[in-house]
Image (cartoon, rainbow, N blue to C red):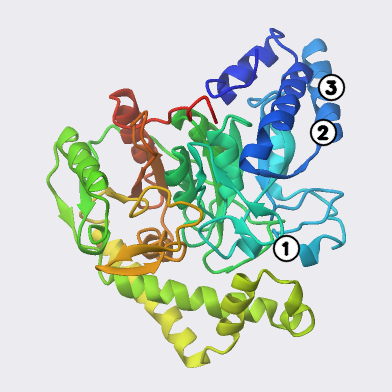
Amino acid sequence: MPLGADASAIVIAEKVRCGAISAQRIVEDVLADIQIRNASFNCFTRVLAETARKAAKVIDQKVMDGVDPGPLAGVPFGAKDLFDIAGIPTTAGAKLRLNAPPAKSDAEVVARLKRAGAILIGTLNMDEFAYGFATVNAHFGPTRNPHDPSRLAGGSSGGSAAAVAAGLVPIALGSDTNGSIRVPASLCGIWGIRPADNVIPMNGVFPFVEILDTVGPFARSLAELVLVYDLLSDSKRSSSDLQPRVARLDGWFERNADPEALQAVDAVMKHVGSYAVAKMPEAEAARSASHLMTAAQGGAFHLESLRHHAIDYDPAVRDRLLAGTMLPAGNYLKAIAFRTYYRDKIRELFKRFDILIAPSTPVVAPRIDQATMIVDGKPAQARANLGLYTQPLSLAGIPIVSAPLNRPGRLPFGLQFATWPGREGMLFQLLSQLESDGFLGAHAPPSEF
């Protein structure tokens, strides 16, 4: 059973648990595939071959002994390079952390997947210190989109999304501060979830903007995404038989959007029988507040390191962090106050609706050498504006799934489905129906890649 684009985590676990295939065989197949194909996409920063082999041997012994190895038995996974992995430095995409002290223990989310029987294969490429939407790393190189290696994978969790999209691993872990799961999920054509604040533990995750940071999984199907989400989450979700009240987000979330994205939103809304439109209050101001909080907290966190090791930073990241250190404190405090006001407004919006829909990204994946995209009729930095639609929703602190549109043969594109905390079950039910009905779904990259 080779691990390819059609090998799901659920099928792998079923076959390993019943003894139809060994975890050791799965790991060897994965390692051989990575050896051949990873160079085309540059997803992995480390491949932990020997530790993966040892973990697979333990799983197989449990099966032989009649012990259930867990719901993810033998399932290979990768982790973005900002999660602690016991015994190795947490690099966070930075050259200056290559010789940092090794982590003493695994990040909690990594430990939870291992306890469920999953096998860590390696660490995955990212924008340095998670500050970017592109995964173009000055030290580790760019991660390339499996659907077209001349294009961006998105970021900052681009290595995670590309590894899953390419079929190198069925699931992977990423982080989302301003859209770093949703942007690469959209550009690479897979499923990704930014959980509600404080639902999945952050222990052992290198911080970026702690007030906004979250972590979550990537997968090639909704069933896999939900399975991993449930294993990672600290809250128990409930299902619902109620028909969700669905609305599309207008205004900011329609400006600059590719016409095909808006057509997809139209089609989904028609299919669910809703023509409701929701106006998200002050979305542009929310994006600005998110920008300001990111720059200020990121700059403050790195200030001491910048004083002594500025030359070792990725120049693009260094300049943004330095700019953040010079922001007036009063502006930061205003952004924090706005966040409280904005969340109250979003709470009121979710009294009228259960699920809100918007594009995940304004465009399909830009070329790696493409410096600009058109925003409000003018050229603007492409990499800085891929999060146009994710950043305002991040500030709300709500759960959001980026779901891939079912468009085989074309560059991928995703839609965001946002809900209020506690309504994740209702959201997953709607997404499952849309996946079954053919509106949503990942498709394999062209075979030549």
Q: Mark 3 points at which residue?
A: 57
Q: Where is residue 373 in the image (x, y as percent from the top left)?
A: 36, 61
Badge 1 crowding class, 10 Å Cα cut-off, few under 14, some 14 to 19, many 20 or more, is many
Which tag, 1 or 3, sits closer to the chain's start?
Answer: 3
Q: Where is residue 242 in the image (x, y as percent from the top left)?
A: 25, 36
Which tag, 2 or 3, sits closer to the chain's start?
Answer: 2
Q: Which amino acid does label 3 sit on?
A: Lys
Q: Where is residue 131 in the image (x, y as percent from the top left)?
A: 58, 65
Q: Name the residue under label 1.
A: 94
Q: Which mark is residue 49?
A: 2
- Asked which quadrant contains residue 204, the reply is bottom right
Point 52% across, 46% down: residue: 235
Q: What element carries label 2?
A: helix
Q: Is residue 233 visible?
A: no
Q: Which mark is residue 162?
A: none
Which tag, 2 or 1, sits closer to the chain's start?
Answer: 2
Point 39% across, 39% down: residue: 412
Q: What element carries label 1?
A: loop
Q: Which amino acid does label 1 sit on?
A: Ala
